[in-house]
Image (cartoon, rainbow, N blue to C red):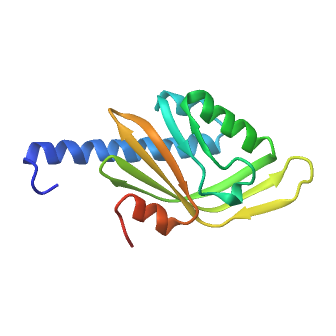
Amino acid sequence: MALLPRAWRDTARVMSQENVEVVRNLAEAFQLRDHERAFDFYDPEIEWNASHMPTFGGVEGVYRGHEGVRAYWREWLSAWSDLYFEIEDVRGAGDDVVLLVRNQRQWGRYSGIETEVGPYGMVFTFRSGKVVRCCFHPDQRSALEAAGLSE
């Protein structure tokens, strides 16, 4: 960002922080089971990439548009009676925002069996204030690297 004029750098920083807050709010809304609020922030042509998450069982793939995202969540959530996770961190990287998740647990809808997913990350890509892409990563390191961040 150093080569951009100061006003552009400041605008980019503000937009990045706004995007970080959007992702934080999306994650918090999901925990409260307010799934529809997210669609106010998703571009109608969003790409939802869950192809790297074999631990999510049966819903791996790339989904497109609002209806694709809804289909993904319907399918995945239908297996669970409840779900809990912690937001470890949310980091901005230009147009990308990384959500780091830990301690995710879910309980089988019919079995009641608790399962756990190891720490993972999601990268949300923004254009014109909307999420145009979301990509799940099986671990936090790969999510950070995908956004050009490293630990």
- Image quadrant containing the N terminus: bottom left
Residue 130 higher or lower than 30, as above or below: above
Task: Locate the C terminus and report the quarter of the image it occupies.
Answer: bottom left
The residue that appears at 38% across and 40% down in the rendered structure is: 126
Q: Residue at image x 54%, y 30%?
A: 65
Q: Is residue 35 visible?
A: no
Image position, residue 75 (x, y; %): 74, 40
The residue under the point 39% across, 47% down is: 20
Report the front residue among 107 and 75.
Answer: 75
Look at the picture and state if 11 lies above or below 145. Answer: above
Residue situated in front as seen by the camera: 63 or 44: 63
Measured as percent of width and height from the top left, residue 10 is found at 17, 46
Residue 143 relative to residue 102: left or right: left
Residue at the outermost bottom position: 151
Q: Among all residues in the image, which is located at the extreme right?
A: 111
Residue at x 48% of width, y 29% of height: 45
Q: On screen, 141 above or below 8?
A: below
As displayed, is residue 47 above or below residue 65?
Answer: below
Q: Looking at this view, is 125 or 20 the one in front?
A: 125
Image quadrant where residue 98 sits: bottom left
**Quarter residue 67 falls in:** top right
